[in-house]
Amino acid sequence: MTVLAAAAAPPAAEPSCYSSVRNEWWCWQYVVDRREEITEAGVQHVGITLAAIVLAVALAFPLALLARRTRRLESTVLAVSTGLYTIPSLALFPLFLPFTGLSAATVVLALALYALTVLVRSLLDGLRAVPEEVRESAIGQGVGPTRLLLRVELPLALPVFLGGLRVAAVSTVALTTVGALVSYGGLGNLIQHGVARNFRAELLTASVLCVLLALVLDAVIVLLQRLLTPWTRGSTV
């Protein structure tokens, strides 16, 4: 009976493009078969990237304002924020492990510090680009320091700051992959696995998705800039 069943069974299907027999770079069947795994990695990648950018922006604002208000601290703030980018991720990530453990928070904190290199300087440059006569005019109309900052200086500084944000966002998308060191690298986890197993389809798919994610995030920031700064639409972004 077993022999008859085996004889009646259909012939084995041809090996797919990511089987042990075939190891192709581009394999749509891999995307279909592993879509849940890819989606989970992509969602994690987006979440870590956005959290790091939001945290970096929240840290960059007070640091840039402090540097502008106190000139003696400016060189120190810029030196520290720039120096953080020179620390290798292999050295920076372990510094947070005693406090955050093997968690996404470790990656978010490290990436936020890396982004400060661009964000602090771009915000400071944007605030300095505000024409002095605009400030004097606002002060002459009775505008206080807080309103001057929020309603005059920051809106005029947005084009420069958002330009820096584009650079920081794209670099953060790339650096998020390094989070695979602590198992929270989003698409970087797939890249690491693909390299370790010589899994070409996995490696290429995750890499392409990283590039697409960076392009989409950059386009979103460009659109945000156009919406928030309509007076710059006639200029080159």
Image (cartoon, rainbow, N blue to C red):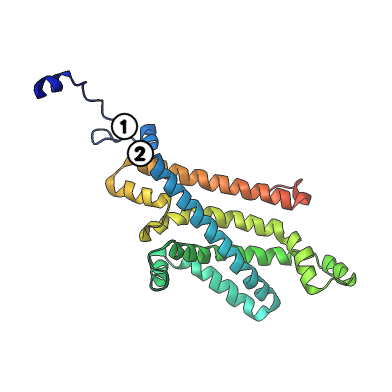
- Mark 2 burial class by Cα count in 10 Å: few <14, some 14-19, many 20+: many
Mark 1 element type = loop
Q: Nearer the viewer, residue 9 or 232?
A: 9
Residue at (58%, 61%) from the top-left corner? 54
Residue at horizontal 71 percent and vertical 58 percent from the top: 158
Left or right of 167, for residue 235: right
Return the disc, 2 or 1, that comes first in the chain's sequence. 1
Q: In the rendered image, which quarter is residue 88 located in?
A: bottom left
Question: Which numbered marker is on residue 17?
Answer: 1
Question: Which quadrant of the view contains residue 29?
Answer: top left
Q: Amino acid at mark 2?
A: Ala
Disc 2: which residue: 201
Looking at the image, is 161 positioned above or below residue 98?
above
Mark 1 Cα-neighbour bin, 10 Å: few <14, some 14–19, many ≥20: some
Report the residue at 56% width, 45% height from top.
216
Verify CB contact (< 8 Å) between mark 2 and mark 1: yes
Residue 81 locus on image (x, y percent)? 55, 70
What number is the disc on residue 102?
A: none
User: Can residue 116 be seen in this snapshot?
Assistant: yes
Asked if residue 172 shows in the view, the reply is: no
Percent x, y for residue 38? 41, 44
Q: Position of residue 4 (x, y in %)?
A: 11, 19
Amino acid on which disc 1 is placed: Cys
* Quadrant of the drawing holding the N terminus: top left
